């Protein structure tokens, strides 16, 4: 039996699981098995809890049936409902003017089940950084080595925190999700996302970061997407605040937004959090956070993330580093990247957070629409699937005046 013929609903449902149904640290991101794994990450690797308040905030509803919306991208007709059924989507939620108007779940996605959000974690981590900057605990213009002397001799030795936030550190790291033998696989082993095989060793995530190689470029010149930069941001947050990331994110973000279900974040074997991609939250709680960002950091009249921080990345218009990417912009040719959020450059000033395997936050401020998508797409980055995702977002947003 191949993974393509596995009944998704039967994965890990016998005791013990049949070999082809067994999810492990070695195979949890493989096609089909990921349908179960991405909603059960804490059963695969170490995690730390992100507690929520005893009383979650109410989420107002004005449910509509959007399933019949036309999301066609070519000659073959396609509805939103049809696309959701066939696109390995696990959760798709829409909010309009603060009210939940549509929700859909597939695979192992469920309202009460935390789903890994991969690099959307970066955008959430940067919100926490913004709070700490307002409090004077962090300063974007301060040198990384002031927070972490351990980075001397690495790519970060002369970088500023702002370079880390904007992914403009000049490093020799290559973000290759399909790598099985090189630096990216070493990064995953250091993060405890892959097993350490016989004859291999790892000193953990922080040691990996402290040894990240530099490149010949200048910091700040061009955007270079590099996940370790956000893990470094997590380390800076913990060092500067003297508090574990999961505790701080709970106290300053999850509890103030009124999240309903505890989240969690993956850890390496030394207890370092993988904040670049390891945050796992329930769908409605991700929607709560995204809607807070649409409202410039406020919930119910209470400011959670500084308005100025969110206004800065939503209005950031220096696209030069973005345009100087080595292979050109992968997303949004007229966009920009600031504080780990994507500014799309599209007519409605949409902005986004993106994670591999199909994770999205999409916000259209003009139409007052917030969308979150959780998925378990086979490929980490599927260029061919991109037009359909964007067509779905645009169709949903256009349905609201």
Image (cartoon, rainbow, N blue to C red):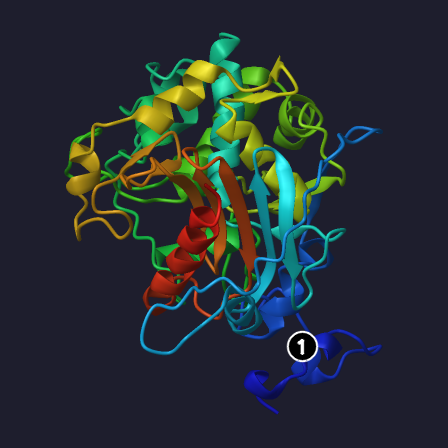
Say if 251 sits above or below 11 in the image. Answer: above
Residue 10 percent location from the top left of the image:
74, 78
Residue 300 percent location from the top left of the image:
66, 20
Is 61 placed left or right of 386 in the picture? right
Say if 312 sits above or below 117 in the image. Answer: above
Number of callouts? 1
10 vs 80, nearest the viewer? 80
Say if 145 sits above or below 196 in the image. Answer: above
Quadrant where the image shows the C terminus? top left
Residue at 75% x, 39% y is 262
Q: Quadrant of residue 44?
A: bottom right
Q: Quadrant of residue 7?
A: bottom right
256 vs 130, nearest the viewer? 256
| SS assignment at label 1 | helix
Residue at 43% x, 55% y is 395
Residue where numbered disc 1 is placed: 8
Residue at 38% x, 56% y is 390
Residue 220 percent location from the top left of the image:
21, 28
Say if 192 sits above or below 306 in the image. Answer: below
Residue lying at the far bottom of the rendered structure:
1
Query: How many residues crowd mark 1 within 10 Å: few (<14), some (14–19), many (20+)?
Result: some
32 vs 82, nearest the viewer? 82
Residue 126 percent location from the top left of the image:
47, 29
Residue at 53% x, 17% y is 131
Q: Is residue 118 visible?
A: yes
Is 87 placed left or right of 387 in the picture? right
Is 200 placed left or right of 319 in the picture? right
Residue lying at the far front of the rendered structure:
401
Quadrant where the image shows the N terminus? bottom right
Q: Is residue 148 visible?
A: no
354 vs 135, nearest the viewer? 354
Is 356 placed left or right of 245 in the picture? left
């Amino acid at each position: 039996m191949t993974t393509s013929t596995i009944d998704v609903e039967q994965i890990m449902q016998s005791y013990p699981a049949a070999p082809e149904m067994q999810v492990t640290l070695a195979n949890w991101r493989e096609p089909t098995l990921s349908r179960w794994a991405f909603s059960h990450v804490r059963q695969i690797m170490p995690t730390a809890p992100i507690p929520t308040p005893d009383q979650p905030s109410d989420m107002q509803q004005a449910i509509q049936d959007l399933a019949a919306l036309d999301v066609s991208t070519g000659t073959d007709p396609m509805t939103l409902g049809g696309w959701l059924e066939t696109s390995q989507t696990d959760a798709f939620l829409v909010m309009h003017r603060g009210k939940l108007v549509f929700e859909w779940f597939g695979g192992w996605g469920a309202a009460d089940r935390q789903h890994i959000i991969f690099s959307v974690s970066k955008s959430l981590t940067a919100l926490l950084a913004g709070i700490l900057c307002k409090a004077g605990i962090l300063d974007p213009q301060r040198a990384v080595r002031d927070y972490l002397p351990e980075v001397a001799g690495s790519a970060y030795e002369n970088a500023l925190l702002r370079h880390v936030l904007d992914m403009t550190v000049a490093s020799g790291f290559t973000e290759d999700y399909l790598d099985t033998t090189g630096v990216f696989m070493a990064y995953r082993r250091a993060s405890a996302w892959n097993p350490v095989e016989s004859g291999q060793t790892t000193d953990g995530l922080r040691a990996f970061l402290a040894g990240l190689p530099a490149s010949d470029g200048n910091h700040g010149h061009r955007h270079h997407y590099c996940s370790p930069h956000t893990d470094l941001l997590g380390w800076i947050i913990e060092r500067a605040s003297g508090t574990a990331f999961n505790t701080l994110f709970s106290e300053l973000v999850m509890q103030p937004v009124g999240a309903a279900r505890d989240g969690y974040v993956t850890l390496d074997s030394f207890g370092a959090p993988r904040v670049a991609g390891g945050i796992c939250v329930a769908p409605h709680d991700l929607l709560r956070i995204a809607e807070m960002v649409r409202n410039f950091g406020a919930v119910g009249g209470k400011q959670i993330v500084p308005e100025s921080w969110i206004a800065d990345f939503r209005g950031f218009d220096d696209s030069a580093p973005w345009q100087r990417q080595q292979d050109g912009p992968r997303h949004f040719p007229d966009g920009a990247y600031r504080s780990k959020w994507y500014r799309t450059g599209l007519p409605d000033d949409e902005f986004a957070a993106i994670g591999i395997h199909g994770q999205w936050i999409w916000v259209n401020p003009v139409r007052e629409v917030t969308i979150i998508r959780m998925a378990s797409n086979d490929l980490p980055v599927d260029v061919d699937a991109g037009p359909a995702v964007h067509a779905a977002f645009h169709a949903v947003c256009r349905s609201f005046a």
